[in-house]
Image: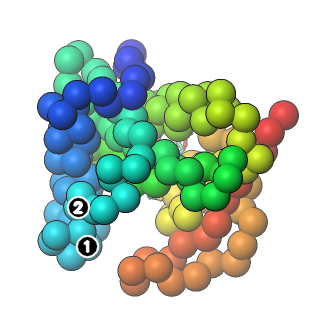
Amino acid sequence: MDAKYKKADSIAEFIDAIRIRVEVFIKEHGSEAGWEPDEKDKDATHFIAIVKGNIVSTARLLETAKQEFKIERMATLKGYRKKGVTRGLVGFVVKEAVKKKPKRIWMQAQVQAKGFYEKCGFKAVSMAYDLYGIQHLDMEYRFR
Ligand SMILES: CC(C)(COP(=O)(O)OP(=O)(O)OC[C@H]1O[C@@H](n2cnc3c(N)ncnc32)[C@H](O)[C@@H]1OP(=O)(O)O)[C@@H](O)C(=O)NCCC(=O)NCCS
């Protein structure tokens, strides 16, 4: 599916990104209401995928230590999954992170999404652990 990838650079785009996170993490996954947005959003760079003028997928990038970048809050609206749009967005976020000459690009991935992130070039670097009642593991981007 054709999608355009970009940084969210207006309040309107940021609000639409948060709407997707509320839809996916709070309504679909059952996380606590009030969890989205959070304090870290003001320090993060937000990314979006646009299909036919609609924002359908989002993720944010945070510098967690000097030259270390973490991808968080990856979420795609249900009707736009399994179409390659999400992989495209992860690829775009990684490309933008690489411009910052990172030592590490990493994430805390839900275990159910491990195979997806492997297809995006990440590898698992920890055992599974509980985070907010959901099994997660740490994954790192494999630089070529
Ligand atoms: C997990 C998620 C991000 C995947 O998005 P998606 O739009 O289905 O992914 P894509 O269509 O870009 O898939 C790219 C490839 O990964 C595969 N894939 C997708 N989800 C997968 C999963 N959960 N496990 C293994 N492989 C997966 C696809 O089959 C596809 O493979 P192919 O190119 O060989 O056909 C999406 O299901 C989602 O937003 N889920 C809810 C929120 C969530 O779980 N976020 C992750 C938190 S860490």
Q: Residue at x 41, y 23 (%)?
A: 5
> Which of the labelled discs sits on residue 45, or is there none?
none
**Vertical placement of residue 122 versus 5, above or below:** below
Which of the 4 quarters of the picture holds residue 16?
Answer: top left
Picture coordinates of residue 139, whole percent (x, y): 66, 59
Disc 1 within 8 angstroms of ligand 1 (CB): no
Q: At label 1, which amino acid type do we have?
A: Ser
The residue to which callout 1 is attached is 31
Please say if the residues under marks 2 and 1 sit with CB atoms less than 8 Å apart. Answer: yes
Picture coordinates of residue 29, whole percent (x, y): 28, 67
Which of the 4 quarters of the picture holds residue 82?
Answer: top left
**Vertical placement of residue 135 versus 49, above or below:** below
Question: Can residue 87 be spotted in the picture?
Answer: no
Q: Residue at x 25, y 73 (%)?
A: 31
Assign a secondary structure to mark 1: loop
**Vertical placement of residue 20 versus 37, above or below:** above
Assign a secondary structure to mark 2: loop
* Pointer 1 local density, CA inside 10 Å: few below 14, some 14–19, many at least 20: some
- Toward the viewer: 128 or 71? 71
Query: Quarter holding the C terminus?
Result: top right
* Pointer 2 local density, CA inside 10 Å: few below 14, some 14–19, many at least 20: some
Left or right? Give the position of 43 relative to 66.
left
**Vertical placement of residue 117 versus 130, above or below:** above
Label 2 or label 1, whichever lies nearer to me, is: 2
Q: At label 2, which amino acid type do we have?
A: Glu
